[in-house]
Every structure is written in C-alpha cells, then in structure tokens.
Image: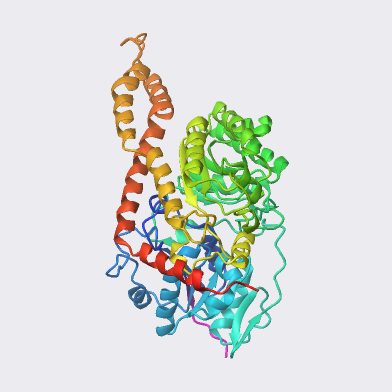
C-alpha cells in the first residue's frame, strides 16, 4: 500500500568546529546548495522541508543544547523528520556531521548527505551513519530518492548515489550534468528556519575550467541564462527587500558574453527603479584586462570583487597552475582600484613545493621569513581593502592532496582542522609547520592591527567634517541630498575599510585565544612523529 501521509526532510548545515574567520559573515548568510535542494523537495507532492543552518541560527525559538547548537533531539520531537540531509562540502564540518548522523540513526531517522567532501569520500560517510551519499548536483537526485527511501524500496535505479548493500558499497551510474537551469525554481530562502539573512548567495555558473591544483571544483562551466539570474535577483529585491548579494560562482566571468548581458540587464533595472544594491563576485585577476566588462560590472551594482591572488611568489604560482606571474598582479589590481571596486584578496601561504624541488639548490625553497616579507610587501603595495591569508588545505579530490599523499607528507589530523588555519602537511627542506602557522598570524595580525582604531578616530574627527561639511558649505546651501551624498563618499573613501579591518582585528584576537586553549600543538607533534615513523611509499 502506498504511504499517503505527509513526510518531512530536514537539511542540516553543520556548525564550524572552531571560531574562525568565516564565523562572523556566516551569521548573516547561508549556503546556497542546501537551499536549492530544499526548494526542489518543497515542490515534491506530500513533502515538507526545512533547512537548519547551525552557523546562522539566531532566532529565539530555536531549541539549543548545552553547547549552544540547535538541539536536534528536541527539533525531532517538535517536528519529526522522516529523512535528514547533511551539507557536506566543507571538510572541517565533517566531525559535527558524523556526530549528528549517529544521533539521528539512534532516533531511527534515515540520513543522506551531499557535497564535495562526501562526493570524493563516500565510503567514509557510509561508515559514519549516512545511509545514502548523493553525488554531483542533487536537486533531481533527492526528489527521486526520498519516496523510495521512505517506502524501503530498491535504490538501484536512482542515478548519482552511493549506498551499502550488505557489506558491498554500490555506486550507481553518474547522473548527466545539467546544461540548462531554467526549469529549476528560484531558491526559497524562507525555508531556512531560525536564520537571519542579510547577504543572499547566488550562483549563475556551476563548474570551473581553471584546473588549479588545490581546488576540487572542476569541469566545464555551465551557466544559467542572464535573464534568469536577473529575474531571481529582482524577485529577492522586491519580495525579501534584499540589497546585499554574494555571487558564489568560482569565476563570475567564465562566459564573458553572458556576463556582459547580465550586467546590462541588471544595470537597466537599477537605473529604472533607483534601487541601490551591493554585490560581491569572485573574479580572476586578469579580468582587469577587459575594460568593457569591468565598467559593465560597476553599472550592474557590483561594488566588490573577491580575487584569488593565492601568492605573490612566482615559484608558487607556477606550482598552483595559476597561469600568470607576480609582475602582472599589481598592474591588474590597480585597474580594479581605479574603477572603484572594493577588493578582497584571498591568499594561500606556504604552498608546498614538489618533492623533487626540495633541497635542489639555495633559493629554490624560500625561508618562511622571506615568504612573509614578500606577502606583506605585496599586500601593502596593492592597497587591497581586506585580505584573507590561509594555510594550504589539501582537500579531498584535489591533485594537491594526491601529490602530498604520494610524497608521504600528509599529517594524520582530523577533518576539523581543514579550514585553512592549521598546518596539515610536512613543508620540507627545513621548514616547520609551526613557523608557517606563526607567519600567517604575523601577516594577518599586521594587516588587522589595533592601529585601525586610531585611523577610525582620525577619520571621524578630521575627514568627516572636511568632506561632509566643507568650507564652501553654508546653512543656505546645505541640503539633505548633499549630506547623504557626502556621507556616502566619506564612508566609502575613509571609514568602511578601516572599520572592517578593526573588526578583523577582533576576530583574529578571538581566534588566537581559542587556539591557545586548544590541544592542537600536542596533536601536531604526535602527527609529525607518526609521519617520521611511517615507512615510505614503494
């Protein structure tokens, strides 16, 4: 007999294991993938769905456990879920995911998971309380899977999943990549329960053809039509009063002509309505060569760019397969600055040289002090607004992780340390992981220093009256429009960056306190000893 009662899917985005540089912004946004899957399931007859983002769960009605996380046993008692789904793209959240999967298994709730981490390591998930792993894009997979899972029917006909059949792991045929996104509904952010969303994530492109060694996002870029993206943004602007957006595609301009068309359509809408938005996109640094494109981006309300600089050191850029060298980086950065973009620079410190390069001559492998000096010098000269300097993360599914494993350089440390703030491999040639971690703290501590507070005070006491109330202003000429325009100009030129940097100082100091209370250094010492005693690969 077919089950006619209503069912519920609860999708959980697990909490970060430590306070980190993402913690503050995570409280104002959410992950897009789980919302897209939840929206698809919400159109499935007989199913209700909700998303619980443990990093953005600020509503007073959310039941909490002793650690301040959502209490999933009480959630299950309040609104029983037949299936719980887990977002598993961030490796650092896997310990929390495994904990929650085991908890739901005790409660008799089937657990499924999807995301980059489990995509590459499905057996690990299946060994830790997950019944089914969804590979690739899951909107269609989950809608086919759920009715079969709740009715205990065979899953063999569902493409793009892994599950256990007795002691055997079954991986079904891969689901064809979607080439059109027009039939998918707009992501429904109202399904994210208990969250307060100030920055709305969007994505026009899936896949990336840059083939960076350290990145797990691969494949031919597939883009939604520009008209579809504009419709989605207008929907959010007019129904949820959204004004801040983050376009999370790895490369916003992967399809140049369609990106130009999107910018034209969005710019037309903003000019006609007078709406003002703030939008951040991720671009390649060499996009600065395309003047037509970056002018169109500014007209479309894109005021900030996140750029993966990775490193100002040529040897590391070559190892990463970035496709350009440091001599071009300052020139291209200045182009973005001249066009008024707020620039967030993303860097990887201490990128591992290939084993054959280690010890092959003086100057081949730079000292930590020299690397630190080059990073500081570049960040200062580039005049970027904010910087994110992380240690290299050998993520599952990357060429980098495979290389380091073959070279016998990976430390056996838990996934919770895979957030870019902890050393995870043997640097080689006399360098130590401790000094690499200390160097990152040195760079970030200098950039996000307490001195930014004094700069804020100077801005308020000197530049604010100079710009907002210039000498030519009289009581007769003073107008509200003048005050608003002058205030915005002062905020953009003098106050915004310094206030964000001082906020970064507070974040950095909080992380440092948390790190000093942790036992990471003890675990690192044990991992180093274990690696030294491990026999070499034959």
Residue 2 part of the magenta-drawn span: yes
| Residue at image coords 72%, 55% | 220
Left or right: 510 in relation to 44: left
Does residue 13 show up? no
Q: How many numbered marks, from 0 up?
A: 0
Query: Residue 128: x percent and y percent?
Result: 48, 79
Left or right: 253 in relation to 151: right
| Residue at image coords 46%, 51% | 436
Query: Residue 93: x percent and y percent?
Result: 45, 65
Front-most of 321 and 506?
321
Tell me the chief SS of the magenta region: loop
Q: Which part of the image, by quadrant, shows the N terminus?
A: bottom right
Q: Is 193 above or below relative to 346?
A: below
Q: Is 490 above or below relative to 224?
A: above
Q: Is 401 above or below relative to 167?
A: above
Residue 47 part of the magenta-drawn span: no
What range is drawn magenta here?
1-8
Query: How does the figure colour the protein chain or chains?
Result: rainbow
Query: Residue 355: x percent and y percent?
Result: 62, 58
Does residue 260 show up? yes
Left or right: 380 in relation to 116: left
Left or right: 278 in relation to 480: right
Q: Is 364 above or below relative to 404?
A: above
| Residue at image coords 35%, 21% | 463
Query: Residue 202: x percent and y percent?
Result: 55, 51
Front-most of 116 and 223?
116
| Residue at image coords 46%, 43% | 369
Q: Which part of the image, by quadrant, shows the C terminus?
A: bottom right
């Amino acid at each position: 007999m077919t089950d006619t009662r209503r069912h519920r899917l609860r999708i959980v985005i697990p909490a970060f294991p430590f306070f980190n540089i993402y913690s503050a912004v995570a409280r104002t946004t959410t992950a897009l993938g789980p919302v897209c899957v939840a929206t698809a399931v919400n159109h499935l007859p007989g199913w209700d769905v909700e998303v619980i983002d443990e990093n953005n769960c600020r509503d007073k009605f959310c039941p909490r456990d002793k650690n301040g996380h959502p209490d999933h046993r009480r959630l299950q008692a309040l609104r029983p879920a037949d299936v719980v789904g887990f977002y598993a793209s961030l490796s650092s959240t896997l310990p929390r995911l495994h904990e929650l999967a085991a908890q739901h298994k005790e409660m008799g709730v089937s657990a499924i998971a999807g995301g980059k981490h489990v995509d590459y390591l499905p057996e690990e998930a299946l060994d830790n309380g997950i019944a089914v792993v969804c590979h690739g894009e899951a909107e269609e997979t989950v809608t086919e899977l759920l009715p079969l899972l709740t009715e205990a029917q065979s899953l063999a006909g569902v493409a793009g999943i892994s599950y256990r059949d007795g002691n055997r792991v079954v991986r079904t045929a891969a689901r064809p990549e979607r080439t059109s996104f027009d039939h998918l509904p707009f992501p429904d952010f109202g399904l994210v329960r208990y969250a307060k969303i100030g920055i709305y994530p969007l994505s026009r492109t899936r896949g990336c053809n840059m083939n960076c060694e350290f990145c797990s996002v691969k494949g031919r870029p597939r883009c939604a039509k520009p008209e579809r993206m504009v419709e989605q943004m207008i929907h959010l602007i007019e129904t949820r009063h959204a004004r801040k957006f983050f376009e999370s595609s790895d490369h916003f301009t992967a399809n140049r002509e369609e990106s130009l068309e999107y910018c034209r359509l969005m710019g037309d809408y903003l000019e006609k309505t007078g709406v003002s938005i703030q939008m951040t996109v991720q671009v390649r640094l060499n996009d600065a060569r395309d003047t037509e494109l970056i002018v169109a981006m500014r007209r479309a309300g894109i005021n900030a760019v996140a750029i993966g600089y990775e490193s100002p050191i040529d040897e590391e850029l070559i190892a990463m397969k970035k496709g350009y060298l440091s001599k071009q980086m300052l020139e291209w950065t200045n182009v973005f600055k001249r066009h008024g973009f707020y620039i967030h620079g993303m860097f990887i410190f201490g990128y591992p040289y290939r084993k054959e390069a280690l010890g092959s001559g003086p100057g081949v492998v730079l000292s930590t002090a020299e690397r630190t000096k080059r990073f500081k010098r570049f960040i200062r000269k580039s005049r970027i607004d904010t910087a994110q300097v992380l240690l290299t993360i050998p993520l599952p599914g990357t060429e980098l992780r495979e290389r380091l494993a073959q070279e016998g350089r990976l430390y056996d440390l838990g996934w919770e340390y895979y957030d870019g703030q902890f050393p995870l491999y043997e640097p080689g040639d006399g360098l130590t992981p401790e000094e690499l971690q200390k160097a990152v703290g040195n760079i970030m501590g200098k950039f996000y220093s307490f001195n930014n507070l004094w700069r804020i005070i100077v801005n308020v006491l000197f530049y604010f009256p100079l710009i907002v109330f210039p000498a030519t202003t009289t009581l007769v000429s003073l107008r509200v429009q003048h005050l608003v325009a002058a205030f915005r100009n002062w905020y953009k030129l003098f106050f915004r960056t310094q206030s964000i940097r001082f906020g970064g100082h507070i974040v950095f100091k909080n992380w440092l306190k948390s790190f000093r209370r942790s036992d990471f250094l003890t675990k690192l010492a044990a991992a180093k000893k274990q690696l030294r005693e491990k026999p070499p690969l034959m």
